[in-house]
Amino acid sequence: MTTVKVTTETRDRLKAMGRGTADDTINAALDALDRAEFWAQAERATAAIRALPEAEQRRRKAAEAALDGAFDGIG
């Protein structure tokens, strides 16, 4: 276990959340941050792919289709 020092204001906010222990609340907040960062990263990647020239987008789609085809029937 590690002690984390927080301000009285932060401690009061954790208590006000009423979601179990402070540890539970911190973990829930970290999970939410992980999800938010995951989706932000996915959106940035999608935007980058959409910004590629049309020919490159077609090449990438063909490569993905070929890879998918290689795995058809496995499992």
Image (tube, helix red, strand yellow):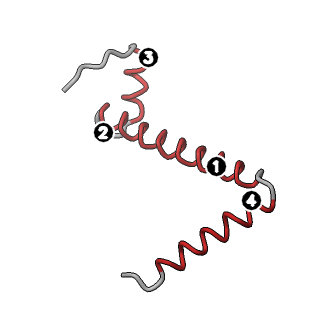
- Is 38 displayed left or right of 23 in the figure? right
User: Which amino acid type is shown beneath numbered disc 1?
Assistant: Ala
Q: Where is residue 69 in the image (x, y as percent from the top left)?
A: 54, 79
For mark 2, what is the residue?
20
For mark 1, what is the residue?
45
Quadrant where the C terminus lies? bottom left
Which badge, 4 or 2, comes first in the chain's sequence?
A: 2
Q: How crowded is mark 3: few (under 14 residues within 10 Å), some or many (20 or more)?
A: few
Which badge, 1 or 3, comes first in the chain's sequence?
A: 3
- Is 73 displayed left or right of 38 in the figure? left
* Real-space CA distance between mark 4 and mark 2, rounded to the nearest whole angstrom: 50 Å
* Real-space CA distance between mark 1 and mark 4, rounded to the nearest whole angstrom: 15 Å
Residue at 30% from the left image edge and 19% from the top image edge: 4
Residue at 50% from the left image edge and 78% from the top image edge: 70
Q: Judging from the image, what secondary structure is the residue with disc 4 in? A: helix
Residue at 67% from the left image edge and 68% from the top image edge: 61
Q: Where is residue 54 in the image (x, y as percent from the top left)?
A: 81, 61
- Is 75 displayed left or right of 40 in the figure? left
Q: Judging from the image, what secondary structure is the residue with disc 2 in? A: loop
For mark 4, what is the residue?
56
For mark 3, what is the residue?
9
